[in-house]
């Protein structure tokens, strides 16, 4: 018998379950990357909506653009100062209003999205959200082609897009949580969460390609991409391993941990509370499940199937240890991250005196750093088994790094490149860890008794609270930046410090858990 080709041997070396998991990993990665791809254009186009017409540098740049785009018909009322109504002196407040409209709607909608998502099939819910998001993203760009200069048109497009985009995060996290256990969840979700940065990078490159010639396409093209990915979602997304008769992830460790929210436990069947002389801590009743088994296996013992479990209430999700602390921490962490997301290209334009396209391309380095930061945070938290401590360590380093970024970025382009990579890693690391591995940990808490439908609500609460910060950050940046960019960075440093303070109780519990574990092994 002839030897099988290397490619075939590689394919059959993986089981059917492993191929399905790899497929779901890749599919959900692409689905949510497309959401972020559609959010990025607004930050790239800001430099085109207002051009600082009083600057000779900008006038020369505009003349170069005009020479390059002679075949393109210039829309009526597009002045050298930008696009009306953003060509006025209060342009920063108007652009900030666009950011705030999207992010405020996103924050409010996120709390409702988790509750609704628990009660609908994920595939239908996510598909509808992506189709609607594609429509409203393209709608903003259509204002260019139809010569719309009404501020409320753009604000309403942002509000509608913010609401429908809330369907994305609870859906994909619930799906990935169903398919993957918690054994190496930090690393797996750290790699998976790079979809945020990948989407931002692709969105920046697509938007920057057309921003100087036809900025309407900077929105229309991403909108079409999101809508097409919605069709892909409808055709291929598998919500749960049981739907294709796949097995659940086996348990790989008897040791449990939960981000400092509960004390750790070593499974010792012969050892109980009376034998060790210590009363059982109340929080010991709320540990993560030791088994990596999926919700079907857990709920089957009670006679309820996956769709037979009742949805968790909002207050019930808040009672899970660690949910409140991590939600508030994410508020400040996301405030910093989204301020960079929406204002970094404009900051680079002002400081480095680059045009909108080059500033947009350069801003992608922040997201490149974010990819490494998310993976590193997941890897460290898995190795140390301390989610809160990992976040705290990166937040502690992020604050002085932001100060260095504000000072060094004025020294030249090379220094800006280095600081963009470092800042991106430290700012996005905690944000990525909390929104993925931590949310999945808390959403599969033992107190939920295997109710997989609760994961959507827990995820929505954490990300919804973080989205409040995401709305406040760009708004505050728009209000503060007229007094100087240094003040914006001071605001970001204070936000990082607040995020760290909110995690101190959980960090203390994790360290105490480690000390108790070490003492137990010595005896």
Image (cartoon, helix red, strand yellow):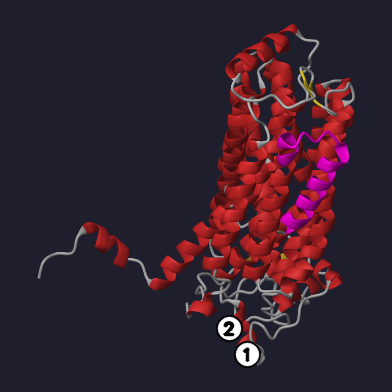
Choose top left, top right, bottom left or bottom right for residue 123.
bottom right
Closest to the observer: 116 or 510? 116
**Residue extending furthest top?**
56
Spot occupied by residue 488 in the image (x, y as percentages of width and height): 82, 28
Dividing the image into 4 quarters, which one contains the N terminus?
Answer: bottom left
Q: Write down the residue under mark 2.
A: 297
* Callouts 1 and 2 close, C-beta under 8 Å: yes
Going 70% across and 69% down the picture, which residue do you hit?
Answer: 455
Closest to the observer: 118 or 337? 118
Q: Is residue 383 visible?
A: no
367 relative position to 23: left or right: right
Numbered tag placed on residue 290 in the rendering: none
For label 1, count other residues whose C-alpha is less than 10 Å away and answer few (under 14), some (14-19) or many (20+): few
Q: Write down the residue under mark 1.
A: 301
Q: Is residue 315 visible?
A: yes
Position of 351 relative to 460 (above/below): above
Spot occupied by residue 19 in the image (x, y as percentages of width and height): 41, 66
What secondary structure is marked by label 1? loop
What secondary structure is marked by label 2? helix
Residue 112 drawn in magenta: no
Q: Which residues are magenta?
A: 142-166
Spot occupied by residue 308 in the image (x, y as percentages of width and height): 69, 86
Position of 73 relative to 112 (above/below): above
């Amino acid at each position: 018998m002839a030897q099988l080709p290397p490619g075939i041997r590689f394919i059959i070396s993986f089981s059917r379950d492993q191929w399905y998991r790899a497929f779901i990993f890749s599919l959900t990665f692409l689905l949510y990357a497309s959401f972020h791809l559609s959010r990025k254009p607004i930050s790239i186009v800001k430099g085109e909506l207002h051009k600082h017409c009083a600057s000779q540098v900008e006038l020369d740049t505009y003349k170069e653009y005009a020479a390059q785009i002679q075949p393109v018909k210039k829309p009526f009322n597009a002045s050298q100062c930008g696009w009306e109504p953003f060509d006025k002196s209060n342009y920063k407040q108007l652009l900030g209003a666009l950011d705030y409209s999207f992010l405020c709607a996103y924050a409010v909608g996120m709390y409702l999205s988790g509750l609704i998502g628990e009660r609908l099939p994920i595939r239908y819910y996510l598909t509808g959200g992506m189709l609607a998001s594609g429509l409203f993203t393209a709608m903003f760009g259509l204002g260019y082609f139809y010569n719309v200069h009404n501020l409320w048109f753009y604000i309403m497009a942002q509000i509608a897009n913010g609401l429908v985009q809330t369907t994305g995060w609870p859906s994909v996290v619930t799906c990935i949580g169903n398919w993957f256990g918690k054994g190496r969840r930090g690393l797996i979700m750290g790699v998976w969460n790079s979809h945020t940065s990948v989407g931002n990078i692709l969105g920046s490159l697509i938007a920057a390609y057309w921003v100087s010639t036809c900025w309407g396409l900077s929105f229309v093209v991403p909108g079409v991409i999101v809508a097409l990915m919605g069709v892909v979602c409808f055709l291929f997304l598998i919500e749960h391993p049981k739907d294709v008769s796949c097995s659940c992830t086996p348990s790989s460790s008897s040791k449990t941990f939960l981000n400092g929210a509960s004390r750790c436990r070593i499974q010792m069947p012969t050892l109980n509370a009376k034998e060790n002389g210590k009363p059982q801590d109340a929080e010991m009743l709320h540990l993560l499940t030791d088994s990596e088994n999926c919700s079907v296996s857990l709920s089957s013992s009670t006679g309820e199937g996956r769709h037979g479990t009742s949805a968790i209430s909002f207050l019930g999700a808040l009672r899970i240890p660690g949910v409140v602390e991590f939600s508030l921490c994410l508020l400040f962490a996301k405030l910093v991250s989204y301020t960079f997301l929406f204002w970094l290209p404009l900051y680079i334009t002002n400081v480095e005196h680059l045009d909108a396209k080059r500033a947009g391309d350069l801003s992608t380095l922040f997201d490149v750093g974010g990819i490494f930061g998310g993976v590193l945070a997941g890897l460290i938290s898995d190795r140390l088994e301390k989610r809160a401590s990992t976040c705290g360590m990166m937040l502690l380093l992020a604050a002085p790094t932001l100060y260095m970024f504000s000072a060094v970025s004025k020294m030249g382009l090379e220094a800006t490149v280095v600081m963009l990579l470092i800042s991106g890693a430290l700012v996005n690391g905690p944000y990525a860890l909390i929104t993925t591995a931590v949310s999945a940990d808390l959403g599969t808490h033992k107190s939920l008794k295997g109710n997989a439908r609760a994961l959507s609500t827990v995820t929505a609460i954490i990300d919804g609270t973080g989205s409040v910060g995401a709305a406040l950050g760009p708004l505050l940046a728009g209000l503060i930046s007229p007094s100087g960019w240094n003040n914006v960075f001071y605001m970001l440093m204070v936000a990082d410090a607040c995020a760290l303070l909110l995690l101190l109780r959980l960090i203390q519990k994790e360290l105490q858990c480690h000390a108790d574990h070490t003492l137990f092994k010595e005896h």
